Image: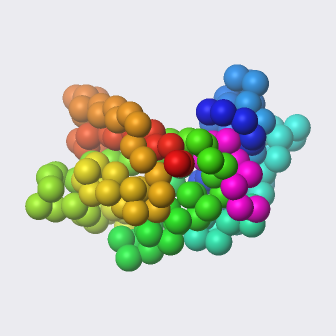
């Protein structure tokens, strides 16, 4: 991931932040839910977890080596996503990386699709469409992984991981 801290944005209860820390990365988590931040702090008292919004990150420009957004953009309405992607780009250092995970929509003719999720409506994104949005934000896709749904999956959506690098 390069130099600098790694922000786990939408960290939930903190288990992925803790995993990153266990790998030797200087990781911290941010989530919009006070309940999730409290759970993370209780489970991992030695790690940093902050309450915050991905649309208005309280992080200086260009200081992070990496940003992880693991299914944290799914509750973002399409018209608000460019602001969040611009925030991701803003806080990344040159050559910093973003890893974003999400569920894929059904095809290019449906670049964004809404579906019912446990807590709020959620959105699926066509990978090429999201990659284009990343480019607009100054992030270039360097790798893509697509996982096809398995028979035991609750939701039968393709899972996508896009790795992007800031120029």
Q: Quadrant of residue 97?
A: top right
Judge by depth and name the residue closer to the eye, 141 or 14: 141
Q: Is residue 113 left or right of residue 26?
A: left
Residue projecting furthest to the left: 109
Please tell me which residue is depicted at 39% across the width and 72% down the height of the picture.
77
Measured along the vertical axis of the image, is residue 114 above or below residue 6?
below
Color scheme of the displayed model: rainbow
At x 59%, y 42%, the residue is 95
107 sits left or right of 72 in the view = left
**Residue 142 point in image, percent of width and height:** 41, 37
Left or right: 144 in relation to 33: left
| Quadrant housing the N terminus | top right
Where in the figure is residue 122, as x and y percent of width and height?
37, 62
Q: Is residue 62 magenta?
A: yes
In the displayed structure, would residue 56 be above or below residue 66? Answer: below
User: Outermost residue, bottom direction?
Assistant: 79
Which contiguous range is marked in magenta?
A: 60-67
């Amino acid at each position: 991931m390069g130099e600098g801290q790694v922000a786990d944005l939408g960290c939930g209860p903190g288990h992925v932040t803790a995993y990153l820390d266990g790998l030797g990365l200087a990781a911290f988590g941010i989530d919009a839910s006070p309940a999730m931040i409290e759970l993370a702090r209780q489970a991992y008292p030695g790690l940093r977890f902050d309450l915050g919004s991905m649309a208005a990150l309280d992080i200086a420009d260009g200081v992070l080596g990496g940003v992880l957004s693991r299914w944290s953009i799914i509750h973002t309405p399409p018209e608000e996503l460019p602001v969040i992607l611009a925030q991701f780009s803003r806080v990344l250092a040159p050559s910093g990386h973003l890893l974003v995970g999400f569920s894929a929509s059904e095809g290019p003719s449906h670049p964004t699709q809404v579906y019912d999720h446990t807590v709020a409506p959620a959105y699926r994104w066509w990978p090429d469409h999201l990659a284009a949005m990343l480019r607009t934000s100054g992030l270039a896709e360097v790798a893509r992984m697509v996982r096809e749904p398995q028979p035991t999956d609750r939701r039968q959506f393709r899972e996508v991981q896009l790795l992007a690098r800031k120029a």
